[in-house]
Amino acid sequence: MNTGSAHFQLVRAVLSLFLFAPPSTLLAADPCSGIQQSQGVSASDTFKVSSTTLSTTDLNAAIGYWSGACGGYGDTFPSMRVGSGTGVPITVIYIDSPSTLASGSCGRTTPTLVLPGSTLQSAEIKIWSKQANGVVCNRVDTLAHELGHLLGLKDAPTSTCQGRIMGERPNNGTRSVSASDCRIADERWRTTSEHSPGERPPRCRDH
């Protein structure tokens, strides 16, 4: 068998997968970056993040996880800003005590979804200073993870996705946003710079 020819055929097959497979197929190929099916495709340009219990510095640092990693930030999915103004209101509550959640985890997001389409109207994010077992939570990293839920991502398997934004946080470390996470945020949102779902771009006509 000609090994050079076999190698060429393999490379061509791989390229075909990535060039012609539907976006949903590519997204499904990454087990650490999945779609939160309960939330539909949403339309907005901005998340308006506010808190009376967490500092502006911490809020901006959590936003930086997404603004620094995704080329589509503020274009194909919403930008995020601290303070007042227009946008989807996101209220962050920091609780300086061990988690009272049944899971014992550091954070919880409660979205308000509206019909049609289960689109995001507002949300409340609660963050605890410690897990129920006493392990200290990283409030900035936890907030960045919870913002991921609002962008349309679900929790990733903790056993295999440690270090990914929707996975488990490494001991004494932080998580990071990947290109796959950015693509899901893009898929779950329609900003004014994009076409509405089902809308076709205008066709050119000869006159």
Image (tube, helix red, strand yellow):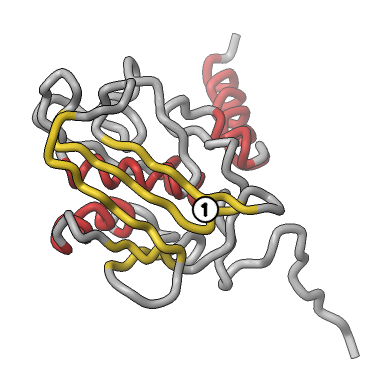
Q: Please provide percent x and percent y for residue 142.
A: 25, 40
What SS does tag 1 mark?
helix
Which of the 4 image quadrants contains residue 17? top right
Residue nearer the viewer, 4 or 169: 169
Task: Report whether 103 appears left or right of 152.
Answer: left
Q: Amino acid at mark 1?
A: Asp
Which residue appears at 46% of the width and 25% of the height? Answer: 31
Residue ID for mark 1: 186
Q: Please provide percent x and percent y for residue 27.
A: 54, 36
- Quarter holding the N terminus? top right
Task: Report whether 64 appears left or right of 199.
Answer: left
Residue extending farthest top? 1
Which residue appears at 14% of the width and 37% of the height? Answer: 129
Q: Examine the rendered structure and indicate whether residue 167 appears above or below residue 20.
A: above
Q: Examine the rendered structure and indicate whether residue 142 appears above or below residue 88.
A: above
The local crowd at label 1, few if under 14, some if 14 to 19, many if 20 or more residues have their Cα within 10 Å, is many
